Amino acid sequence: MAAVVGKYGFALPEQKKEGDCKTPAGIYKIGTAFGTAARPRGLKMPYRPVTRRDYWVDDKTSPEYNTWVHYEGNPAKRWKSFERLAIPLYKYALVIRYNDDPIMPGKGSAIFMHIWRGPSSYTAGCVALARANLLAVLKWLDPDKSPVIIQGTEPFIFSLLKRRHGTQC
């Protein structure tokens, strides 16, 4: 299925920086599904409903960098930079577990799979799909099978597969 990525394509993990509008290349675990809508029927993944007080912190000076925080106050007074999670593109979404073990400030945050604006759009570093395709992926994922996402350019992905399996691709 078609997808869109960061405005400036992919970045290798060692080159990824906060705010570079690049999608991190690599193999990443899939985290929690979330959204502003009710939990989709048939979803096996953990699902967290979003409220207007939910934020993802991308302030690299904050100890809460690259984490989801529910906060009742004014977020602009608490963080230099944050992302509101209660937006239409996150009607359905899931966390791509990039830069979370350990969290390295400034290496990129808030990497999700979410609804796209359209097939010729781009993201700030996430992966985005048509709503129907995203729902299909969300329902297909099974947390008991430890799902991952492999993302990057075709040569990069082939090099990963070759290193992991020692085969020609």
Image (cartoon, rainbow, N blue to C red):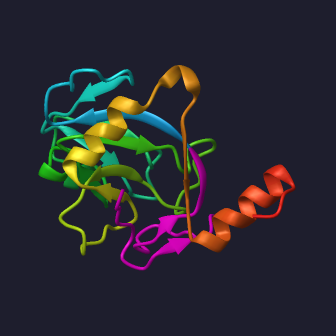
Foreground residue, 162 or 25? 162
Q: Identify the residue at image location x=46%, y=35%.
A: 31
Q: Identify the residue at image location x=47%, y=45%.
A: 63
Quadrant of res 68: top left
Q: Quadrant of the C terminus?
A: bottom right
Whether residue 76 sits left or right of residue 43 in the image: it is left
Q: Main secondary structure of the magenta part?
A: loop
Whether residue 33 sits left or right of residue 120 in the image: it is right
Whether residue 101 sits left or right of residue 129 in the image: it is right
Q: Identify the residue at image location x=12%, y=50%.
A: 88
Whole-percent x and y of residue 106?
A: 52, 63
Foreground residue, 20 or 135? 135
On the question of residue 14 being in view, the answer is no
Is 95 placed above or below 14 here? above
Q: Which residues, given as a range, are shown in magenta?
A: 1-28
Whether residue 72 sits left or right of residue 98 in the image: it is left
For the image shown, how many numbered marks are present on the structure?
0
Residue at the right extreme, as displayed: 166
Whole-percent x and y of residue 116?
A: 23, 59
Is-magenta flag for residue 15? yes
Whole-percent x and y of residue 122?
A: 30, 71
Foreground residue, 38 or 98? 38
Is-magenta flag for residue 11? yes
Q: Quadrant of the N terminus?
A: bottom left
Whole-percent x and y of residue 154?
A: 60, 70
